[in-house]
Amino acid sequence: MNSSYVVAKFGGTSVADFDAMSRCAQIIQNNSQVRLVAVSASAGVTNHLVALCQNNLTQIERNKHVTQVCDIQNSILKNITLDSDLADGFNQTLNLFQELAQNDNPSEKNKDALLSFGERLSSYLFTQVLRGLDINAVRFDARDVLKTDSQHGKAIPNISATKDAALTDLCPLLESQVVVTQGFIGSDNQGNTTTLGRGGSDYSAALFAEAIDASAIHIWTDVVGIFSTDPRLCVKATPIAKLSFDEAAEMATFGAKVLHPATILPASRAGIPVFVGSSREPNEGGTWIEKEKTIHSGIRAVTQRKNQILLTLKSPEMLLASGFLAKVFTILAQYNISVDLVTTSEISVALTLDNAPNASRPELDQACLDLLSEFCHVTVENNLTLIALIGSQIQLQQQEVNLMQVLSDFDIRMICHGASKHNLCFLVEQSRSDHIVQSIHSRLLEA
Ligand code: ADP
Ligand code: ASP
Ligand code: MG
């Protein structure tokens, strides 16, 4: 039985400045069920923090990023006066940030500490903006509840430890006030700060919702829902009113940046519906993601994920041999490399890996490549895009079109279909991918 509480998450553009924060505060004021709020860093801040994690920055470059982070906070602070309980914490946090930002060659642990400051700072400011509307709001440190392993930059949450901590430390606070916490950050067993990967605040909101047994998760962003493709790329993209957990999970996994890829996991595990809407236009509706009730068959969306790596491993010894794939995957697992698409032939296996720019951790490790090279010929290709057609019961012969005919116009590097009923994926040259997505959208998704 779910509680009646709603978890709301506000992304970077929604908390970019005082006006944006005020619109979000209004949304909270209009819905008394919203009791737990997870905020992102103000837009742009995490990019500066990622830049500060680079090695060998010049002092001038370092100072520039620090100043820009501080300027964003100050432009919001100009509009509010922090209550003393928030002011002390805010000032300490800002000082700590400025100190840590001076470290050259930060360790993985210190990188996560540095990356956490965006959310830690914005949550102080947002709490005060809520108080400005007479909302009884308190700030809460997400690291006290969101427990993870120690994989810095890409930490894996510990679901049961998070639930236990939420039950004792967080749930009692929700009874009488709005609790503002941070997305994206958590802590490991030793109390070190960890992060969930870029865009991870959506995932945090879903994890918090699962932990407090919420009735819904509201993801407030800068678009009025999940569209048939990125609305920035196709002006004719249309919002989708309802998606199943499976469809939404596939869209997020295959590049619909509007949701972090893992967001749907906790929601679907706990049966909590997810709403995605625009904090700028909260009355324009949005997308509801729920356990499937009605089945729409066919393609509903097209997504793309740029900066993919294609790893081809060739070994004549693979012919009629067993154990080759097991060996390959054991090594990839050892380096925490997550594989998306896989195709195999008699003597080779081709794999795709995500190499997101601005990721807080590089995907492919040279040491891993060296290990693979000991028993097979390794080729690495970059500058590829993975395009996915998403829906339910996708078949090569759709109602009116033959998908193979549509796809035959493009130079496809690799194709995967069949492992999931919800997608058909293929790899193309990155320089052509925007055009291919637009063309597919116009032929398959525009009436
Ligand atoms: P936030 O900062 O709120 O987390 P993001 O920038 O992470 O927001 O995600 C919102 C962006 O996702 C939109 O501005 C849009 O350009 C992009 N996007 C990509 N694919 C889709 C899609 N299918 N539907 C809606 N938005 C999408
Ligand atoms: N601030 C983090 C990022 O920009 C997390 C998030 O916004 O979801 O990646
Ligand atoms: Mg996001």
Image (cartoon, grey):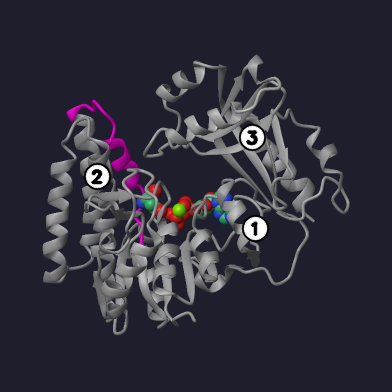
Which of the numbered marks, if any, corresponds to residue 247? 1
Position above or below: 135 against 108: below
SS at badge 2: helix
**Does residue 55 show up?**
yes
Expressed as whole percent of the image width and height from the top left, the position of residue 63 reads 19, 36
Q: Report the amino acid beneath label 2.
A: Leu
Q: Which residue is mark 3?
A: 342
Q: Earlier in the sequence, mark 2 or mark 1?
A: 2
Mark 2 or 3: the one toward you:
3
Expressed as whole percent of the image width and height from the top left, the position of residue 355 reads 48, 34
Q: Earlier in the sequence, mark 3 or mark 1?
A: 1
Q: What residue is shown at x 24% (from left), y 44% (from top)? A: 114
What residue range appears in magenta? Answer: 39-59
Expressed as whole percent of the image width and height from the top left, the position of residue 434 reads 63, 37
Q: Report the amino acid beneath label 3.
A: Val
Q: What residue is shown at x 22% (from left), y 53% (from top)? A: 191
Position above or below: 316 against 117: above
SS at badge 3: strand
Which of the numbered marks, if any, corresponds to residue 114? 2
Q: What residue is shown at x 33% (from left), y 69% (from top)? A: 164
Q: Report the amino acid beneath label 1.
A: Glu
Q: Earlier in the sequence, mark 2 or mark 3?
A: 2
